[in-house]
Image: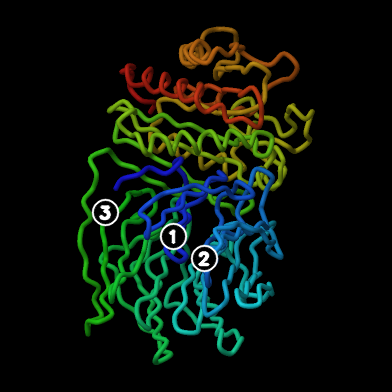
Amino acid sequence: MARGRTSARCRVATTVGSKALFVGDRERAVDVYDATMDTWSTATLSQARRDLAATSVGTKALFAGGSSHDGDSNRVDIYDSVTGSWSTARLSQARRDLAATSVGTKALFAGGMADDYSKRVDIYDAVTDTWSTATLSQARQGLAATSVGTKALFAGGWTGRGNSSAVVDIYDASMGQWSTAQLSQARTDLAATTVGSKALFAGGSTGAGVTLIQHDVVDIYDATTDAWSTVKLSQARSLLTTTTVGTKALFAGGLAASGRDFRSSARVDIYDAGMDTTIPQQTEAVATPTGAIQTRAIGQSAGGRPLEAILVGNGSEPVIFVGALQGGAAPNTRDLVQQVAAYYTENPTEIPPNVTALFVPALNPDGLADSARPNSRGIYLSNNWDIRWSPDPDTPEGRKSGGGGTQAFSEPESRALRDLVLEHKARAVIFFQAAAPSGLVIPGEGPGTAEPTISLPLAELLSQTLGFRLIRTWSDRTITGDPSDWLDREGVMSVIVLLPTNTDPDFDRQKQGLAAAMQLVSQRQEPPPQ
């Protein structure tokens, strides 16, 4: 039986009893599959959020933490498979990108990112229906978790400033005690699963952006002998999907990339715990004919948060769509770019065959986390580019001394987008911002004069498609260091689209604009900028 989920969203799932539950990506919807009845139903989280963690213990499935429109969340939604009822609890610390696993009667939620990297472990006891806390030996996010025997293991992760961790924090539920071990290599974005008496931690990466390095090592902890060993994947990669069936652990797909060479993998490595061998079996998954789809790291924010781009298509004419340049001033622009990325990921044939769409949902994750317009260093990314740059820009919040940065491109977010544009030789870049009543469209003004620019045809098309008024510049302030102006000067069409509000992503209307923009680029046969 085939059945689509209520909407496209990030993968967060767990099972309890005869039911599998799927949630995530800042939507409240929960899709519930009942294996006994072979039926689907829906439920609702108490709060929409993403980057949450899920696990099950006893008769309960728990969905904890994450990031909501209001910032990091401490919410825990709890589903009881016996009564079919939902309840809520609270983590001791609001955070996102945490890891979860269960051992014995306890569910553990460890690490993550709050205002900083977190050491916190929240522990739920299903027998006593109580919560307690513990502390990891090292604060980190992006760690991997699994359990084997009486032990829960939390391995690797990201500690910030380009550093990954080799630490494994181990909780023994039978003793109520914590200990530590070390992976053979420090790394983040690794995959964890358990087969028989063995816990496996596979792949992962170190570095970010052009310094990204993938790893092929699999660290194996044997709970029977309390010993560690290693094997190798057939291909170095991170962000794998893993599961276990019978005596076999499967590690599928992932990101196989180093530096600027980014590609998704179709490889599946199969480790058979019942075989007397240290070499995983491997097979090639069948690739779908719908075009390339990749998620790649493009750098880190000033606050150490990852910057990502989602690439859909194989065409020679790249178009980049950017959200949350203004951080918390326009969180709906992040949601919009996430939603259109999810739509085109599921419907890649709607992208013209000679176009590649690149989606950057959040260029300013620091501002989103802080509910502020600048990044974590107080720099306004809309004023940090090398065109008519000023250290003291006029902003929608007034003149900001030092708000333009110490120099043009001083900020890692600006450099990451600039490098993405240059690397792919982008034809067009569209920035989504907010808010302007009834909406606005503003073309890039490279020359800084009233003459037509290369961005004007795209702006006119978007104005007509969206029904938004087109203006050439702001009358109440001088624009300095603007990215769309820089792009226009460099020969890349660039337009700012201001949504009518800073809450509604305006998905249906904006999707029409995106489609029109890609069609325009598809039909233009000018040489890319050098």
Observer-nearest of 409 and 286:
286
Question: Which amino acid does the dot numbered 1 rest on?
Answer: Lys
Observer-nearest of 351 and 387:
351
Question: Residue at coordinates 65% horizontally, 32% vertically from top-left?
Answer: 503
Asked whether residue 446 is in view, the answer is no
Asked whether residue 277 is in view, the answer is yes
Q: Is residue 167 above or below residue 116?
A: below
Q: Which residue is mark 1?
A: 19
Judged from the image, the secondary structure of the residue bearing numbered disc 3 is loop
Question: Residue at coordinates 55% horizontally, 17% vertically from top-left?
Answer: 443
Q: Which mark is residue 55?
A: 2
Residue ranking furthest to the top: 451
Question: Which amino acid does the dot numbered 2 rest on?
Answer: Thr
Report if the CB atoms under discs 1 and 3 are less than 8 Å apart. Answer: no
**Tag 2 or tag 3, which sits nearer the N-term?**
2
Q: Residue 412 placed where, x, y %?
A: 57, 45
Judged from the image, the secondary structure of the residue bearing numbered disc 2 is strand
Badge 2: residue crowd in 10 Å (few <14, some 14–19, many ≥20): many
Number of numbered discs? 3
**Tag 3 or tag 1, which sits nearer the N-term?**
1
Q: CA distance from mark 1 to mark 3?
A: 29 Å
- Horizontal side, residue 197 vs residue 54: left or right: left
Q: CA distance from mark 3 to mark 2?
A: 27 Å
Question: Residue at coordinates 75% horizontally, 16% vertically from top-left?
Answer: 476
| The image quarter in which residue 20 lies | bottom left
Question: Which amino acid does the dot numbered 3 rest on?
Answer: Ala
Q: Which residue is mark 3?
A: 266
Q: Residue 68 placed where, x, y %?
A: 63, 47
Q: CA distance from mark 1 to mark 2?
A: 13 Å
Q: Which mark is residue 317?
A: none
